[in-house]
Amino acid sequence: MRAFQLFLVFFFSSFVCQAQLLEDYQDLWEDGGETTWFESNDRLILPLDLSTFPYAYFSIEIPEQTVVFLGEKLWFFTSQDTTLNTSLADFKLIANSSKINLTLFKTGISLEEVSAKKVMNLEGPEKELTEEVFVKEKMGLNRQEIKDFFTFTLVIILVLVTAYKSAYPFIFKVIARPISLLNAEDFSDSGSLQKFFSFDVLFFVLVVNMISALAVILSVVFFKEAWLEARVIINFQNLMTGWGLISLALFILTIIKFTTIRIIAYLFELGKVEFAHFFYLLRLVLITVSALVLILAYFIMNDFYLIKTALGISFTIFFWIYILGTFILFVSMMNRLSFKKYHLFTYLCIAELVPFLILAKWVIVIGG
């Protein structure tokens, strides 16, 4: 009799220890569809139902090198094959809804690599999905907020550029041409831009700074996400406010920089060379940062999880382009102006190279 009782205990214990399958989601996975400029087909989407079996768990198998989104929020990245065991109640804390989509991004991901089930009991260690863990341990960026912010600011910039082109078509044509970085026409007396504190010039400087501010704020969001989230909520309103403040700050710093260059040029007795020098490098910044924004547009709309890598590479390229542009500026000034070479070299080092290298080092330290 005792042996029979022990048999029953072990028999029912084995069922209790096993996970009871409630729902199998394997047939509900949706692939990314056809590749477009805005969407990638290297993804699988799973609609999760949080309204049934409130005490159940989700058991989800995720392959290595996969970026996982919960709704519109970037959740985490798997460096190796992972089985995610999380209670349905924890999902509800984040979703605030009875349904939410789980999205997996990976190049060449297939249905054979993934699995999703709703079970009654857990077969492995539970991974809690509390709000605190979600914010502090995971990447909590809201992808849709970033998209909305980027799209809205880009529209504003394009409207201003269109207005500038309509108001000053000849100046816009000169500014927007990359060849203007090679012919250095502003060093001639017939240069298109001659007065800094005129409306056309200040308008141009403002637009350049707005484009630069867009790249800056997105860099802060992606490289210093944890630091930023500890201080403000990363949403559309705060991003717009930050973009406006950064644009204004850069605009003021640009005016200060021009004034500094004018003072240094006066001390070196170089004449009225500061205007051509300043706008040569400002056009360089405009063209390179505009290219950076176009790159960001692609990754934000298509491969969101690769933005950080794309930003890092883009800023490295920008660094070397700026150094190269300063060298071309030196050659142009040397050929077109009758100043001694060591005067020009010392002037550019003090006015451009040293401040730029200090700024680059500061950015690297902050970004690290």
Image (cartoon, grey):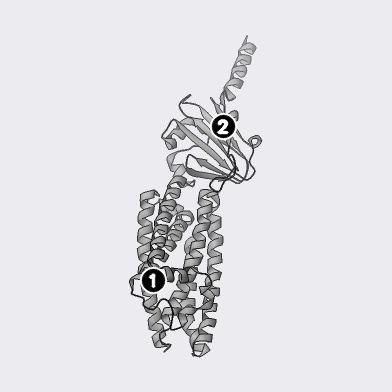
Secondary element under disc 1, as helix, strand or loop, is: helix
The answer to whether residue 368 shows anywhere in this view is no
The amino acid type found where label 1 is placed reads Thr
User: Residue 367 location, x and y as percent?
Assistant: 49, 61
**Residue 55: where, in percent of width, then height?**
47, 26
Report if residue 314 is visible in the image: yes
Q: Point out the tag, 1 or 2, that comes first from the N-terminus.
A: 2
> Which sits in the foreground, 102 or 184?
184
Q: Nearer the viewer, residue 256 or 140?
A: 256
- Residue type at mark 2 is Ser
Extreme residue in the right direction = 112
Q: Nearer the viewer, mark 1 or mark 2?
A: 1
- What residue does disc 2 label? 59
Above or below for 357 versus 240: below
Disc 1 to disc 2, C-alpha distance: 54 Å
Q: Residue furthest top?
A: 1
Q: Where does the N terminus fall, quadrant-wise?
A: top right
Task: Give above or below for 121 relative to 182.
Answer: above
Where is mark 1, residue-wise? 254
Query: Crowdedness of circle 1 by 10 Å Cα count: few (<14), some, many (20+)?
Result: some
